[in-house]
């Protein structure tokens, strides 16, 4: 199963996780893992998700997530897990 | 499982340190397009390129989106046209028609450059190849995306001094004919010694005759990533310095490996090589010169520059080789003047000269690259510069190249603008003592001996 990494970075505010999770649930994207920290008021979150069962294609999900990020005032990126595995694991 | 800090490190490289994949280059063999009828040949070439590379740009964009790393260029290299056109072309104009076909095909599939308007004349020129070389100025003036290269020597064959003499004249003519376009023609023309068959980087890319029908080669980059990593080990000894470069080069090259594998899989085309070159751009922070300064030089060109570049180049290779299953192409640090802000600053400050750049090319790829010189420089002087650079490659068994741009009506110190990734450059002084008698002798310099290395 190919996994996807979603990163959310930006100024902390109420409801970031709620809005991101709602979007994912609406699009049938399953969350496998979440880690999150706040560094100097900055919200840093990483999610590992399974987007294989979504009806939308990767490109569309990625664009819509980025748009959602703009509405909340944070930056949301969606990337294939491959890039991190290949760079950080031998 | 991947953790937050690793993800952040990767994304910081992209967002703050200009990490990108510089190019996916599809190498396409045109040997099966050869026909003695010129119209048929042109038709075959156009059809083969537009069929093979139909999905190249779209696939590149798709991979870029999925992994979140920019893939700056999608390009094509083809079999040297000096071979492909030999049976059909009866004049230089015939060769120019092939250049126009390549340009049309490049525009149709949406790649920004197509390389391979080339010929390999390291020992001798056939009449067709000489015609092709003479057609280069016209070909570059009448096309937008075609890049040209000529291999004039190798360690195995020695140097073809007749071709080197001719290339001096061709560069001057290209410069005159593309004067109104800021001599852009010369920026798309490279003279090689020991040219590799699988180089993905322009302007010197061509698809060698030793290659398969169609392959994917990838050029990675990332000077900014190396520079930033080194800024964290300031004052530490060479062991720490070298380890840091190696580890960083590994990570950067892995990105290229992933892109190459994915592109190869999705396009159904075998993976050729990754080129490990550190390729700068004019963007601030994307500079090889800044890495050398971070290593400890006030300016590039200061004593110690050649040693610093040698260690940088070697460590990049050591880190990169482990990261990729196949390494090839030029694989070294590029030191183009116009495409690297730190180099431009060093020239303007009086720290960096043509002679020092020549010394630097002894320890790194690829050669005298994107250097603007005064427009009144004689053709024989340019041939002399090419011969010097080719001799370095021949004796040291490495690739060297010259991409030099004589700028009409401009004097030393004035600026010339090429635009985009090609950047801008200050006109540099050239030693103007004559080498006419040397260049005009004609013939070849014999291949060097491979023993008694000193």
Image: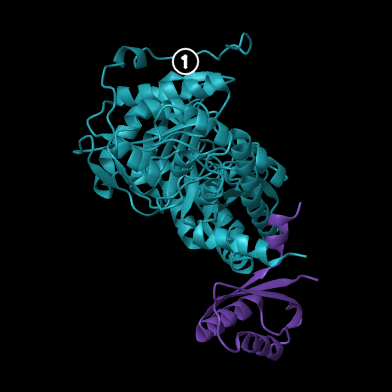
Chain colours: A purple, B cyan
Q: What's the residue at 67%, 46% (across, down)?
A: B272
Q: What's the residue at 58%, 89% (across, down)?
A: A14
Q: Where's the C terminus of chain B, which quadrant? A: top right
Q: Is residue B165 visible?
A: yes
Compared across the picture, whether B402 is left or right of B276 comes to: left
Residue occupied by mark 1:
B444
State the count of labels.
Answer: 1
Q: Where's the N terminus of chain B, which quadrant? A: bottom right
Compared across the picture, whether B236 is left or right of B306 comes to: right
Q: Residue furthest right?
A: A1
In the displayed structure, B85 sits above or below A88; it is above
Q: What's the residue at 33%, 26% (across, down)?
A: B382
- In the image, B79 versus B186, the foreground residue is B186
Residue density around tag 1, few if under 14, some if 14–19, many if 20 or more, within 10 Å: some
- In the image, B315 versus B451, the foreground residue is B315
Q: Is residue B324 visible?
A: no
* Residue at mark 1: chain: B
Position of residue B368 measured from the top left corner of the image (x, y, whole percent)? 42, 32
Q: What's the residue at 32%, 37% (across, down)?
A: B347
- In the image, B407 versus B26, the foreground residue is B407
Position of residue B75 measured from the top left corner of the image (x, y, whole percent)? 52, 53
Position of residue B434 measured from the top left corner of the image (x, y, whole percent)? 27, 16
In the displayed structure, B18 sits above or below A43; it is above
- In the image, B16 versus B221, the foreground residue is B16
State which quadrant residue B188 falls in. top left
Helix, strand or loop at disc 1? strand
In the displayed structure, A30 sits above or below B27; it is below
State which quadrant residue B406 falls in. top left
């Amino acid at each position: 199963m190919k996994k996807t990494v979603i990163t959310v970075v930006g100024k902390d505010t109420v409801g970031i996780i709620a809005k991101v999770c709602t979007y994912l649930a609406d699009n049938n994207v399953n969350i496998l893992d979440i880690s999150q920290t706040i560094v100097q008021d900055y919200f840093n979150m990483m999610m590992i998700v399974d987007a294989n069962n979504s009806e939308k294609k990767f490109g569309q999900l990625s664009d819509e997530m980025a748009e959602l990020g703009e509405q909340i005032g944070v930056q949301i990126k969606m990337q294939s897990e491959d890039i991190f595995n290949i760079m950080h694991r031998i | 499982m991947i953790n937050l800090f690793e993800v952040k490190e990767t994304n910081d490289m992209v967002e703050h340190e200009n990490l990108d994949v510089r190019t996916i280059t599809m190498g396409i063999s045109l040997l099966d397009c050869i026909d003695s009828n010129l119209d048929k040949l042109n038709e075959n070439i156009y059809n083969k390129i537009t069929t093979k590379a139909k999905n190249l740009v779209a696939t590149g964009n798709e991979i870029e989106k999925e992994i979140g790393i920019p893939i700056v260029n999608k390009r094509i290299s083809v079999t040297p046209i000096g071979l492909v056109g030999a049976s059909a072309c009866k004049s230089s104009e015939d060769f120019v028609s092939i250049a126009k076909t390549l340009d049309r095909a490049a525009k149709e599939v949406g790649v920004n450059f197509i390389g391979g308007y080339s010929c390999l004349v390291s020992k001798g020129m056939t009449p067709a190849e000489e015609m092709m070389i003479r057609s280069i100025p016209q070909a570059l003036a009448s096309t937008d995306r075609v890049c040209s290269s000529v291999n004039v020597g190798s360690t195995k064959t020695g140097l073809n001094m007749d071709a080197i003499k001719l290339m001096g004249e061709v560069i001057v003519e290209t410069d005159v004919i593309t004067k109104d376009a800021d001599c852009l023609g010369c920026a798309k023309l490279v003279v090689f010694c020991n040219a590799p068959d699988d180089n993905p980087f322009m302007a010197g890319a061509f698809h060698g005759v030793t290659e398969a029908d169609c392959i994917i080669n990838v050029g990675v980059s990332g000077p900014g990533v190396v520079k930033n990593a080194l800024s964290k080990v300031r004052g530490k000894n060479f062991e720490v310095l070298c380890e840091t470069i190696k580890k960083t080069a590994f990570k950067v090259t892995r990105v290229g490996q992933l892109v190459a594998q994915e592109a190869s899989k999705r396009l159904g085309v075998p993976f050729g090589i990754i080129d490990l070159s550190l390729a700068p751009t004019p963007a601030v922070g994307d500079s090889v010169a800044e890495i050398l300064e971070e290593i400890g030089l006030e300016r590039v060109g200061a004593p110690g520059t050649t040693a610093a570049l040698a260690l940088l180049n070697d460590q990049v290779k050591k880190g990169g080789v482990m990261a990729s299953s196949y390494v090839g192409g030029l694989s070294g640090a590029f030191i183009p003047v116009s495409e690297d802000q730190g180099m431009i600053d060093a020239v303007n400050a009086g720290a960096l000269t043509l002679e020092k750049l020549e010394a630097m090319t002894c320890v790194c790829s690829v050669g005298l690259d994107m250097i603007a010189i005064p427009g009144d420089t004689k053709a024989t002087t340019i041939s002399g510069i090419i011969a010097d650079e080719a001799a370095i490659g021949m004796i040291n068994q490495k690739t060297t190249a010259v991409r030099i741009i004589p700028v009409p009506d401009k004097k030393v110190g004035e600026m010339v603008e090429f635009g985009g990734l090609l950047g801008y450059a200050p006109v540099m002084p050239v030693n103007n003592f004559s080498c006419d008698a040397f260049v005009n002798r004609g013939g070849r310099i014999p291949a060097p001996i491979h023993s008694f290395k000193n």
